[in-house]
Each structure stands twice: as C-alpha cells, then as structure tokens.
Image (cartoon, rainbow, N blue to C red):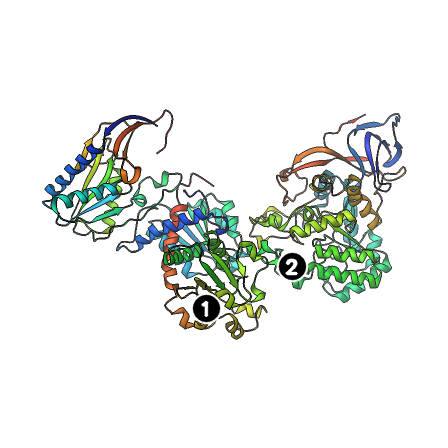
Amino acid sequence: MDRLLLKGGRVVDPVEKKIWTADVLIDGGRIAALGPDLEPAGAAVMDVRGKLVCPGFIDMHVHLREPGYEAKETIETGSRAAARGGFTAVVCMPNTDPVADNKAVIAYIKARAEQLGLVRVYPVGAITRGSRGEELTEMAALKEAGAVALSDDGRPVSSASVMRRAMLYARMVGLPIISHCEDTSLSAGGVMHEGYMSTILGLPGIPAAAEEVMVAREIILAEHTGCRVHIAHVSTAGSVRLIREAKSRGVPVTAEATPHHLTLTHRAVAGYDTSTKVNPPLRSEEDVQALREALADGTIDVIATDHAPHTPEEKEVEYQLAPFGVVGLETAVGLVWTELVGTGILSPVEAVCKLSLNPARILGLPGGVIRVGGEADITVIDPHAEEVVDPSAFASKGRNTPFAGRRLRGLPVATIVRGRVVFSRGLAVVA
Amino acid sequence: MKYKAQIMDQEGIRRALTRIAHEIIERNKGTEGLALVGIRRRGVPLAERLAAKIREIEGREVPVGVLDITLYRDDLSTLGHQPLVQRTEVPFPVTDRKIVLVDDVIYTGRTTRAAMDAIMDLGRPRLIQLAVLVDRGHRELPIRADYVGKNVPTSRREVVAVRLVEIDGEDRVIILEKDEGPSFK
Amino acid sequence: MKWKRKDLLGLQDLSAEEIALVLDTAASMKEILSRPIKKVPALRGRVVANVFYEPSTRTRVSFELAAKYLSAESVSITASASSVVKGESLKDTALTLAAMGADVVVLRHPLAGAPHLVARTVRCAVINAGDGFHEHPTQALLDLFTVREKKGTLAGLTVAIIGDILHSRVARSNIWGFTKMGARVRLCGPATMMPPGIEVTGARVCATVEEALEGADVVMALRIQKERQQEGLFPSLREYTGLFGLTRERLALARPDALVMHPGPMNRGVEISAAVADGPRAVITEQVTNGVAVRMALLYLLAGGGAVDG
C-alpha cells in the first residue's frame, strides 16, 4: 500500500485549537503516524514546509447538476473542481432531474463518485417528493441509501405545516434538515437585494424580510419539534440576529454563509453582470458586516459555497432572465484566506473549523480533524501563494463567478483524499 | 508648432478689409439685396467688420448671418470625436439674396464647399461670393475666392493663423510651422 | 469638452459637462428643425437601427426623424414582447445588427440592463431608449433641455416629481439629470411605489404632495398604470387621484411661473387634470419637439468616429 509522508508542515488541529509543526504519515488511506521528525522507511515524501496541513475541507452546499443538467456540471467535473479548490468532500443538493427524492438517485450519485475516486460526495435527499412541498419523501430509505441530510434547496417548502411534519419525521429518522429560507411570496419576481442599488438599477428587489420570515419560522419549528435544522446561505443581519438568539436558548440550529455573501455587496450588480445574480442575493454593506461578525462569534458555523454552475449561454442574457447561482468551489479557500484570515476576522484555526470540523460534526461525517487511525483526508494550504482568478482555468464547467480578475493570497496547494493526492499545485512528491 | 513669420499686422488687416468692402460694393453695384455670412469661427468677426466698413462707405446696413458648417464637413466619418456643433444664425431669408461668405483663410476649399451646401439648405440665393482675408493656395476643389486680402504662398507643412481682437485679443496674421512627425489638425 | 463615450446607457454615468454638451448640441440642432429643408448631411451613409422590444410610437418616431434629418439611414425593428423570452437571444440580435453594418443601435427593452448587454456585445454605439424600470436617458435630456430653454438655467431650480417612482425609468433619469445640473429634486408618491433608498440619488422624498409642490419651479406628473392596482400597489384610481392628482388647486402651491411636464402618454383626470394639462404652464407638446433635437444631438455625438472606443 502507498505510504506518503507530509514533511515539515504546520498541522492545524481545530479540536485542540492549535497549530504545531509535525509530520504526517499516511498509510493505506489512513493516518498512520503524526508527530515531529518522522522518518519512516519506504514512504514517498511531500515537502510541505511553510504550508498549513489541515483536515480535509468539506463543502456542505454544492450543486453537481447530475443527473439531469450535465451541460452545467457533472459529478466528474464538479469533483475535479472540488479537488482543485481544496475540498476533499462535497455535499450535493437534491435539485437534479430527477430530483434526489428516492433511493435510486442517491445511490447513483454515490456510485458515480466512488467510480471516479476523486473526492467524497455526500448526497442530500429531498424533503418532499419532487421538491414540490407537498408529500414527504421516504426519509429512512434515503438515509439508508446514503443521504446525509434533507433539503428542498432552491424550492423552499412554503407550507409551515409540511415543514413541521418534515421536521418531526426527520428527527425520528435522525437526519438534519437544511433549509433554504425564502418566502417566495415576498421574493417573487425579485432578482437582487431590495435596497438602494435595486432602486438605482431598476431591478425588482428581494427584501431581506423574504429570508428572515422563513428563518424565524424554521427556528420556531425546530424548537417545537427538536429537529436539527441547518440554515443554508444566511445573507442578512436580521437572520443573524434570529439565529444568534435561538442558539443562546439552545435551539438545535446551525448556520452557514457563502464566500460571496461574506465578501460582496449588492454594489457588485452595477453593470448588470449576471455572474452577480445569486439567490439569496448579494446584500447590503451592513449585512456583510453582520455576517462577518456572526462568523467570528460562532453564530455562523460553516462556510459553504452554494456552488451553482450554469452554462455561458444561460448567463449571457438580460439580468432578469438569467438563472440564479455562482460557482464557488475553486475560489472559496482563496477568498476565505484573503478576505477573512488575511484581515483578521478569522484565525487559521477558526477558518479550518468553518471549512472542516463544523460541517463534519453537523452532518456526522468522517474527518474534521487529523488523528492517528483516522481517514487520510487532508487539505494543504500555502498561506503565501497568490493567483488572479481566471475562470477559463476552472475545472468546473461553470464559469459564472463574480470574482474573475480578483487577486487571492492563501491557496490550496494539495488535496489528499483517502491518502491519494487528487490535486496538487507546485508540490513535488519524491519517492 | 513653431513661429515662422508675421505676414499681416493690425494695419494690414484693416487696409485689406477696407479694400474688400469697396470691392464688394463695386462688384455688386451697391448693397441692394446684399448679405454677409460669416463662417464660424473667425469669419464671423470679419463679416461684422466688413458690414461696419460698408456702413461707413455707403451709409447702408447690410445684414450679417453666422454659419456653422460642422454638420456639412466631408471628414466627419474619419474623425475620432465629433466636433462641437454650434448654432447657425441667419436671421434673414436667403432666397434671392446676394450672399457673400466670409472666412479667414481659404486653403483646400472644402470649408467653402460645405458652407455653400449649408447656405443652399437655407434657401436659393441669387448668387454666392466668397471673401477671405488670406488665400494660401493648395486648393483641392474647383473653388476660388472673389475677394482676397492677401495671397500668401505656403507649404503644406505650414499653418496660417489669423488672430483677431474679438477672439484672440490681437490683430495679426502669422505663419507657423508644424513640428516633425505625424500631426493632426 | 469632447464626447468620448461609445454608448449612452443612463444619465447616472454622465458628468454635468457631458449633459451640457448634449444640451448645447441639441440647441444647434433645434435651429435645423425650424428650416424649410430639415436636413443636413452630417450622418450620410450611417445606419441607425431602432430596436424596440416594447411598443413606443412616440420615442421610435422621434429617433427615426432625428436620423432622417441628419441624413442617416434608419431601420426600425419592432419585436413583440414575447420574443424577449423565446426566440433569438438579445445577444444574437445585437451581433446580427452589428454584422449588417449598424453604426448606432437604439434599444427599447422591457428589462433593465438590456442595453448594457448589447453595449458589451457590439462595437457600435448603443443608445438606451428606455430599459425596464432603470433609465430613459433621452427622455430626461429632452426634459432638461425644455426646462433650460424656458428657465435659462437648471442650477438652483426645484423640481417636483409626483407618482409611481418605483416603476418609472423617466423619474430615475430625471433625478440624475436634474441633480447633476444643480437642481433640487423632490419626490412624492404612494409608499408602496416609492423605491427604497432613492435618497442616495440626492432626491428628497416628501410625505405629502403639498410639501413636494410648495415653491416648485417644475412639476412633473408620472403616468400611473392601472395594472399596479391589480398588483395590489394602490387601492383605486379614485384614491390615487385624490391623494396625488395634479390639480389647479395643488399647482397653486408651486411658483407662479412653474412649468408642468408629463412624459406621456397622459391619463387625463387621473394623475393630471385636463385643466392643468391644457393650461398655460404646460410644456408637454414642446417636450415632444425638443425630443427630436435632443435625439439628433445624441445620434450626431455617438455616430462620430467609431474608430475610437470608450
């Protein structure tokens, strides 16, 4: 079996909240040894001096589009994008065609991912059949097939009654619910944040209330049902306040924010670039500030990308006609390091919590920390590496990023899954 | 662009305009039906000065109009930016008048061509004549001036600059020479 | 001051100097409109494509005449609103027109930002003739021209815009235009049709129509559309007229020499009473004449050169 020694790196331990210099020996897909100055015989060596050796990053919110929308992305291209972006695992949403509301689709996604042998892919099952918001899916069967959570992402459950029953049932089955919080009667027709920029641009707005009304509902229902609820892509200051208050009372709620909501405001929409069209929309300066504070104080547990690839043909249209969504897998880590770690909002350890430990804990996934005997899923970061975002270099089929041309500092330079290097940039392995 | 020579001073300009005023009256047998139209920009004060001279000589008012020929230029499609369009103000009917166009310099003749087209769009004059302070040659169209203040042989590398009190604060005509290398008007 | 822009997409982008250049050029163009032969050869051989995805006889004819008076060839394409969604994409339509040799594309489109998409796609000049609820810069320029002609200046004037600001591209362009030229703009309309954050433009939102009209030099009434009632944005035309209708009594609050404007088409008896619309202060028909002069100025400025972008 392959033995690989990561030599001289700074190992990030998000559980002990420390960074220490240690070598990591990987053997047979597992961590075989961890400590200073390891000198095993017959291991290939990767020199990672000056790099951060982190437990593998898990993006708990992506859209791989397969089955059904292979022109936008496939499990293969999405997996390659994940590897290139420093993610060892992705959690994919069920809004495929057919919807992942049955065992067959879940099983297909898992089988295809295993066949590829790139990154780990964990499917999310639908809450309701066809994500139509009416009948519950066979949640126990979905779990058995490999679903790690339930969500009607992109087509939020509008009926409070259906959601309440879904939470009761999901709790019984033991799966968390990931909620895309949007009151569609408030957001209907909207294409960007409702505020002074939507006013100037003459585009229909999505008020902050469209999200906050649903966040409040989910918190109330989570409290009553005891179901674990994870709020997807939090975007407003009001949502942050609601979640912070709920957490303080012990409501079983967790939350994520995306790199784009943490770094861009609605001002980015000026010029009508459809790669800024995303749901929930890019919000105001005050909202971004509140999200950053919530990230620092722990109200927001996870950074997830909501990677949503589309074809250029779909995006090269009038702003109102373009589909929502931006790609994120290949810019997320660089953005986190440049905009959040580099600015002191998060320490490197905290960033690794948001990208690895917390999503693993919320979804009960392996990983999240580097331990002897544990799975050898590792992300290596070079905190000094720089690049300018070039969408044409993406492994993803999607090029719809609002970050083209942005200079990033702090990049993933190696992605190791089950002990296998699935991506590396400028790091040689010497046998 | 560097200074080369002065070809007319204030007195020279005054005498030339006095002579042209006499010639206009003589050629047209008085001022009946006569109108002066200055071509923007330096043709305008020259037309006004000629009108004043004619008033001194004949005791008759000759109407003066202002013509902006920008929209009639034949080089619009080749310029990088559109030149400023200013108002054309010809406050009298053109039809059946004897129109004397007034400009500072005649060179290729293209400005005169544009001015004739512009005048004809305003009506059908009985005749059109042309008065200029300086004729520097190098015509590119079959056009000649009826009244000339001074004929000045020039090379194409030279520029004739007519400077008038009303616009430039002084009266003189000088020749400048373009610097080496490509140049743009 | 030289015109350096490839496109005219909105007044938000323009400086006061650029707006003044358009207005000055339009004043020169207006002289041509008074001639017996309304034609100059300035744009001979140039092609202006009027592409209208929304019906607008007024704006389209205004651009067609402006092109003809400047000797440009003009073609008009009226696409049905449904073709916005299905059929050829806007990008392909723009590429086709450019390939056919259009020098200027005049675009009216129901979706905000459509002219920006076209402007990014083609090398030729693009004029926004109204995009969704975003901007209608040529209408605002003719409004500015009309007011400047009547008042001699724009600086220091107080302009009241009354009505459905949320759905009005005319209001947005006029707010930018008037404020850039040194006028103060007051807004008044139903709270459900007042867009959030509009104050960032420099306009002031007034609580009552009386407050907006008090001492105003210019009063602009916007068209109220019946569909907005079905959308639940206001309860009835009767209540709208009662609260916001421009009547002689209300107009008495403005300065005695105040101008009354309306971008048309008017709902007489709804947002503006017939007595006010036909009254001595109304300059509504002059707005139409000035529209041709302003559009001639824009076609002239934008059709120039072509070799120089930006």
Q: Position of residue A312 (x, y in %)?
A: 60, 46
Q: Chain of mark 1?
A: C
The location of residue A391, given as percent across then percent down, is 63, 40
x%, y% of residue A91? 77, 48
Tell which tag, 1 or 2, sits nearer the viewer: 1
Left or right of A263? Residue A346 is: right
Q: At label 1, which amino acid type do we have?
A: Leu
Query: In which quadrant will I find the C terminus of chain A?
Result: top right
- State whether residue C134 is above or below residue A55: below
Residue at the (77%, 30%) spot, across then down: A50
Tell me the residue that label 2 is attached to: A207
Residue nearest the viewer, comparing B154 with B64: B64
- Local crowd size for mark 1, using a 10 Å CA cut-off: few (<14), some (14–19), many (≥20): some
| Residue for badge 1 | C253
Q: Are marks 1 and 2 on the same chain?
A: no
Mark 2 belongs to chain: A
Q: Quadrant of residue A140?
A: bottom right
